[in-house]
Image: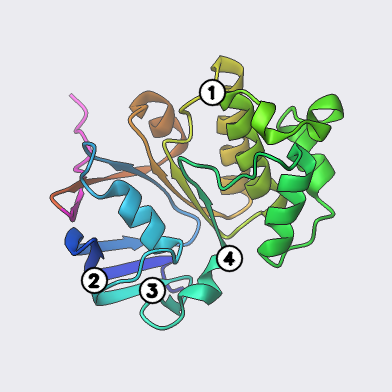
Amino acid sequence: MDPSVHLRAVVALLGGFPALAGADLSVGAGEAVLVRGPNGAGKTTLLRLCAGLVPPARGEAFVLGHDLASDRRAVRRRVGLLGHSGFLYDDLTVRENVVFAVRAAGADAAPVPASLERLGLSGRLAGTAVGALSAGQRRRTALAVLVARAPELWLLDEPHAGLDAAGRDVLDAVVTEAIAAGATVLIASHDSDRAQRLTTREVVVAGGLVHEREPVSAP
C-alpha cells in the first residue's frame, strides 16, 4: 500500500524563505506520528503543505496519492487540518460554521448533529455565534468539523492549545477513535506527554528538515 504521505527533498517557501529546506517524510496509512520541534522550525508549514495549502517549490510531495505539485486542490477534500485559526466565521453560529465547512469540503452534513453532541456543542451552544465563544469552545467547534467530515488524513497543529482538561480529554478520545477507524494522523505538539499517548512514532523538524527520532532503549 502506498504511504499516506511521501515527501522527498521537499522545499517549501514562505515569503521567499525556505521554511522546509529538503524535507523527507514517509507516513504509512493508518499511522499516527508526533511532529516535534522548536517554534519556527517548519512544523506548521509541514502540516499546511500536507493539507494542500502550501505548494512545494521543489522535490517530490505526494499525499493520499495526489501530487501536490499539480493536484493540491484535490487532496483538500480528503484531508482535515486543525490549525491555529480554526477557519471559523465569527458571525455564523456554531452549527452554521460546521455545516458550512463540511459542505465546502464536499462532504455530507448529516453527521453534523452527532459531531456537535460529541464535542459538547449541542443545545444552546449550537445556536451561539462563534464570535461569542471562549477559546476552548472555538477549538471544539473546529474539531467538530473534522469529526463530521471524518477525513482520511488528520493534521493537528497544537490541538490541545486553548482547551481545558475536559476538552483535552475529549480531543484525545476523538483522535483515538479516528485512528481506530483507520485514519492517518500527524500531530504537531509541544504537549509531548499527551501527544505521545496518541502516537506510535516521532519525528523532529529542525532547520527545515525532518529527522526520525530514535526510540529510547529500555534500560
- Of 107 and 178, nearer the camera is 107
Of callouts 2 and 1, which one flags the residue occurring earlier in the amino acid sequence? 2
Residue 21 seen in the figure: no
Alpha carbon of mark 4 to alpha carbon of mark 1: how far? Answer: 26 Å
- Of 108 and 29, nearer the camera is 108
Q: Specify the label residue 8 is tagged with.
A: 2
Question: Residue reaching furthest bottom?
Answer: 70
The quadrant the C terminus occupies is: top left
Amino acid type indicated by mark 1: Leu
Q: Which residue is mark 1?
A: 163
Q: Which residue is mark 4?
A: 78
Using a 10 Å C-alpha cutoff, classify the residue at mark 2 as few (fewer than 14 neighbours), some (14 to 19) or many (20 or more). Answer: some
Q: Which residue is mark 3?
A: 62
Of callouts 3 and 2, which one flags the residue occurring earlier in the amino acid sequence? 2
Alpha carbon of mark 1 to alpha carbon of mark 3: how far? Answer: 32 Å
Amino acid type indicated by mark 2: Arg
Alpha carbon of mark 2 to alpha carbon of mark 1: how far? Answer: 35 Å
Using a 10 Å C-alpha cutoff, classify the residue at mark 1 as few (fewer than 14 neighbours), some (14 to 19) or many (20 or more). Answer: some
Residue 72 seen in the figure: yes
Quadrant position of residue 92: top right
Please tell me whether residue 38 is drawn above or below residue 66 in the rendered image: above
Kindly indicate whether the residue at mark 3 contacts the one at mark 1 (C-beta within 8 angstroms).
no
| Chain part drawn in magenta | 208-219
- Of 131 and 82, nearer the camera is 131
Kindly indicate whether the residue at mark 1 contacts the one at mark 4 (C-beta within 8 angstroms).
no
Kindly indicate whether the residue at mark 3 contacts the one at mark 4 (C-beta within 8 angstroms).
no
Q: Residue at x 58, y 65 (%)?
A: 78
Of callouts 4 and 1, which one flags the residue occurring earlier in the amino acid sequence? 4
Using a 10 Å C-alpha cutoff, classify the residue at mark 3 as few (fewer than 14 neighbours), some (14 to 19) or many (20 or more). Answer: many
